[in-house]
Image: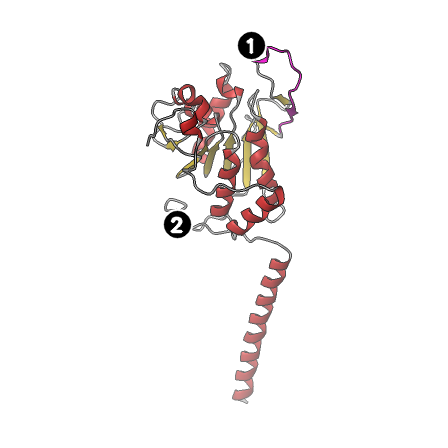
Amino acid sequence: MMPAIANFKLLSKSLAVLLFSLSLITSSAAGIIPPRIESQSRENGNPSKPSPRRFGFVLPRAFDAVDIFGPIEILQALSRQTHLELALLGRTLEPVTTEPANAAMNKFNSSFWPRIVPTHTFADSPALDVLFVPGGAAARSPDLGPEIAYVRDVFPSLRYLITICTGAGIAAQAGVLDGHRATTNKAAWDEITAMGPNVKWVSPARWVEDGKVWSSSGVASGIDLTFEFVKQKYENGTAIAQMIAGRIEHVIVSDWRDDPFADQFNVPPSN
């Protein structure tokens, strides 16, 4: 009688293992990515955190479109593989334009200014894992009080802050880059770095990763930064990034020091 019981237990364990294996195969075939448990080194001593899910984008007037939609293109593709949430943050829920507030920056009186509709206001302050801060003419605006205040207030609760191009200037004015290594657009280097005298500005650099603070150089470099973020923070991230890049026909620049624009704009090496 005892051998029969032992054999039944062995058979039950074998079936359980088989069913678990089949569930993994089914999930893989469906293209579902389980949340990645990030390593202790990547989470600065806080292991067992799942991959970031909740992304926010600040929408200041005169933001650069690619600063926003470059990363969104990649993250939208990622959202077809794993659960992500998007918050577009403005002062109000009225559409935000890329048109500069300063008429001198639109001397030909063009009307070529797309608008984007926020999903949340700064006052809503939705819970976020990652916040993107774009640049463009917005970074040079004298009217950035609400954006600067929001970035400053939300920074402690974020897992990651990501600045694109001259968006580093907005974050620098909020004081959240102080003591961190960061970079920005080399064509606007002197102007933007002056906004953060306590920031460790890095050149040459296509992007810089410093703990919870990530920053990219010019507009298009934000795409490469986002691919690097996906590689590091998601299960099978490198394969996913390569898949997305192939579909949008983008050649990923994987070396963060690959920055020919530092020489082009005579920005000397630093940090």
Between 9 and 184, the residue placed more toward the observer is 184
Let me know if residue 126 appears in the view: no
Q: Which residue lies furthest to the front in this view?
A: 264
As drawn, the label of residue 40 is: 2
Q: Which amino acid does label 2 sit on?
A: Gln
Colour mode of the rendering:
secondary structure
**Please, is residue 20 above or below residue 222 in the view?**
below
* Image location of residue 47, percent across then percent down: 41, 50
Dot 1: few (<14), some (14–19), or many (≥20) neighbours within 10 Å?
Answer: few
Q: Is residue 119 left or right of residue 210?
A: right
Which quarter of the figure is the N terminus placed in? bottom right
At 53% from the left and 32% from the top, the residue drawn is 220
As drawn, the label of residue 104 is: 1
Instruction: Provide the residue span drawn in magenta.
Output: 105-118
* Nearest to viewer (mark 2 / mark 1): 1
Distance, label 2 to label 1, CA atoms, is 49 Å
Dot 2: few (<14), some (14–19), or many (≥20) neighbours within 10 Å?
Answer: few
* Quadrant housing residue 13: bottom right
At 63% from the left and 59% from the top, the residue drawn is 29
* Image location of residue 254, percent across then percent down: 46, 43
Instruction: Label 2: state its secondary structure.
Output: loop
Q: Does the magenta stretch include residue 106?
A: yes
* Image location of residue 139, percent across then percent down: 49, 21
Q: Does the magenta stretch include residue 59?
A: no
**Please, is residue 72 above or below residue 140 in the view?**
below
Q: What residue type is labelled 1?
A: Ala
User: Mark 2 vs mark 1: which is more N-terminal?
Assistant: 2
Let me know if residue 55 appears in the view: yes
